[in-house]
Amino acid sequence: MSHADTTPTSAGPSGSGARRRLPRGGVLGGMLLVGGALAVADQLTKNWAEANLHELVPQPFLGEFLQLTLLYNSGAAWGMGSGITPVVTCLQVAIVIGVIVFAVRAVRSPWYTLALGLVLGGALGNIHDRLLRPPGPFHGEVVDFLELPHWPVFNVADMAVVGGALLIVLLGVIGHAADPAEVDAEAEAEAEAEARAQGESPTDSVASPDDPESPKGTR
C-alpha cells in the first residue's frame, strides 16, 4: 500500500497543526440549515404574537424586565426609516446577498458558518415581512413583540442578526480566521522565511536516505 493511500484527505493543510476546515458545500449547507430554522422560528413566534397579543398593550413575561408588546414596524430600529420602507427592504436583501457571497468566497470555518447563518436567518425572517405582509410588497410592516427596558421592541429575527454580528466581532477579536487554511499557510510561510533568514532551507535538517553520514545510509 502506498503512502498516498494511507494519507487522510483534507480540504486544508494536513498534520497536527491543521484546523478543521469545511468545504464550500458544507458552509452553504450549514448556513442554510441555521438560517432556515431561524426564519421558520421567527415566523412562528410572530404568528403567535399576532394571535395572542393586543397591539401596543404590554404583557409582563419576565416581570418588568421583558414584556410582550405587539407592534408593527415599517422602519428599522426605533422606527427610523419608516418613510423609506422599500429602501430598508432593499438593504436587507443586499445583506443576504453579501452574506452568501462572502461565505462562498472566504468562509471555511464552522464558527463563521454559524455566525453567518444567524445573520442570514434573521435577515430572511424580516424580509418575509417586508415582502409578504400588509400593506404590500417592499412596504410590509415587520412584526415586533419583545420589549426590554430602554430598548426598541424587537423579534426573534432581530435577535439572530445581532447575535450573529456579535459572534463575528468576537471571532475577529480572538483571531479566529474565516478560513483556517489561511492561518496554516501563513504559519508555514513564516517558518520558511525564518529558515531562509538563518541560511538554511526547511528541508536541510532532514537527513537523506542516500547520505552516507546519515544513520540510514550506514550498513
Image (cartoon, helix red, strand yellow):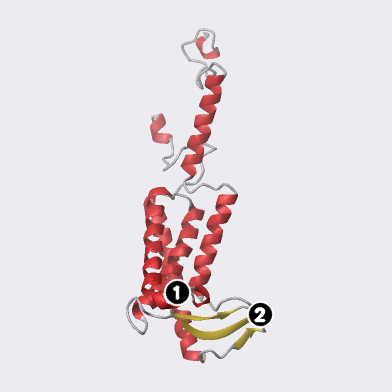
Q: Residue furthest front?
A: 83
Near-viewer residue (167 or 41): 167
Rounded to the nearest angstrom, the CA distance separating label 2 from label 1 is 27 Å
The residue indicated by pointer 1 is 81
Residue 81 position by quadrant:
bottom left
Q: Residue at x 32, y 78 (%)?
A: 137
Name the residue rendered at 41%, 68% in the picture. 36
| Position of residue 87 in the picture relative to residue 212 (left or right) | left
Work out whether 43 lies above or below 219: below
Question: Residue 10 at what x, y percent from top left?
Answer: 43, 42
Q: Nearer the viewer, residue 189 or 73?
A: 73
Residue 65's mark?
2
Helix, strand or loop for disc 2: loop
Q: Which amino acid type is marked by label 1?
A: Gly
Instruction: Describe residue 94's horizontal placement relative to residue 70 as left or right.
Output: left
Mark 2 and 1 residues: CB-CB less than 8 Å, in contact? no
